[in-house]
Image: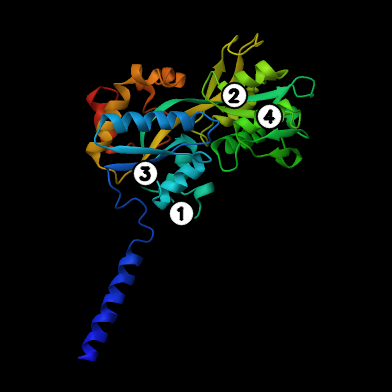
Amino acid sequence: MKKSYLFLANLLILALVVSACSGEGEGNANASSDQLTFSTGTTSGVYYPLGALLATHWTNGSETSVSAQASNGSVENLKMMQRGESQMALSTVNIMWEAYNGENSFEDGAYEDIRILANLYPNVSHIIALNGAGVDSIQDLAGKSFVYGAAGSATELESKLILSSHGVDLETVNENYVGFGEAVDLMRNKQVEAVNIYTGVPAAGASELISTVDSKVISFTEEGIQTMTNEENPWNFEYLIEAGTYEGQEDEVRTVGQFSSIAIDANISEDAVYEMTKSLWESLEELEQGHAVVQQFNIEEAVKGTADVPLHPGAERYYKEVGVLE
């Protein structure tokens, strides 16, 4: 009898171990479509309030409960999704491409289940430099103190691409890694000479900085733009910040942007993602009251510049239904 009990006890322990091991590495494979975590960004950027707005909208208007969570931005967001800690995220397309293909920040393992729900608005680099600091071009950042962005963010990676595309040796730059709010404070205190505010246009952080600190937005060179938008960077496109967008800006500024998008895990049900996509695009007037950046949302651009990262089938169904996709 004792042997039988011992056998059953060992069998139960073995079953528990197998069950625990079988869950390792599954990520979102067993995710529920009824309750989703939406990773966003730093509290001083656009992603955090936008993510909170969208999460509240979806929770109030559908059977899916979505909770927003702050983070350091795109890279951390997709790492969280890959680990199964969230099921949705805001991200720039380049980081989604890296995750899907297992490159750079994701070289330890591709996140093959990442999908796109929608492109939302252009994320644009604003290289802002203090007047009198000797920074009149991107090349002048060599030897200067520069804020790349928060560590692990898309801003950091894009900043490094900007500098290298303009021939700046990154080893010569006094690097700083903080979010938008901290960057503005460093500029105001003249602890750094330039920063990249990488967000929608007009950027609240850029407006605040330029209106309170004697500074300017720097244009990219033709050669730098060509390098940043070549076939190795299929997510990037040239962007013109119109004259007068910011205080004292008399001329247009040539820069580069890419789309900020909603990433979602492939294991979330097609019907749930279809309803969320539909609710997003058919509620823009309501959402605009919550954040000005929503005015830049354009359904005709929702599936452009995705760098071959797949759409979620639920989102794809909606875009075909409304004629955005054939």
**Does label 3 or label 1 sit earlier along the sequence?**
3
- The residue pinned by badge 3 equals 87
Q: Are marks 3 and 4 in contact (CB under 8 Å)?
A: no
Task: Look at discs 4 and 1 and give the one toward the viewer.
Answer: 4
Amino acid under disc 4: Asp
Looking at marks 3 and 4 on the same chain, the residue that comes earlier in the sequence is marked by: 3
Q: Secondary structure at mark 2?
A: helix
* Mark 1 element type: loop
Residue 75 in view, yes or no: yes
The residue pinned by badge 1 equals: 109
Q: Earlier in the sequence, mark 4 or mark 2?
A: 4
Q: Position of residue 122 (x, y in %)?
A: 48, 24
Look at mark 2 in the image and give the residue it sits on: 205
Instruction: Say left or right for 323 vs 122.
Output: left
Quarter of the image that includes the C terminus: top left
Q: Earlier in the sequence, mark 4 or mark 1?
A: 1
Residue at label 4?
A: 185
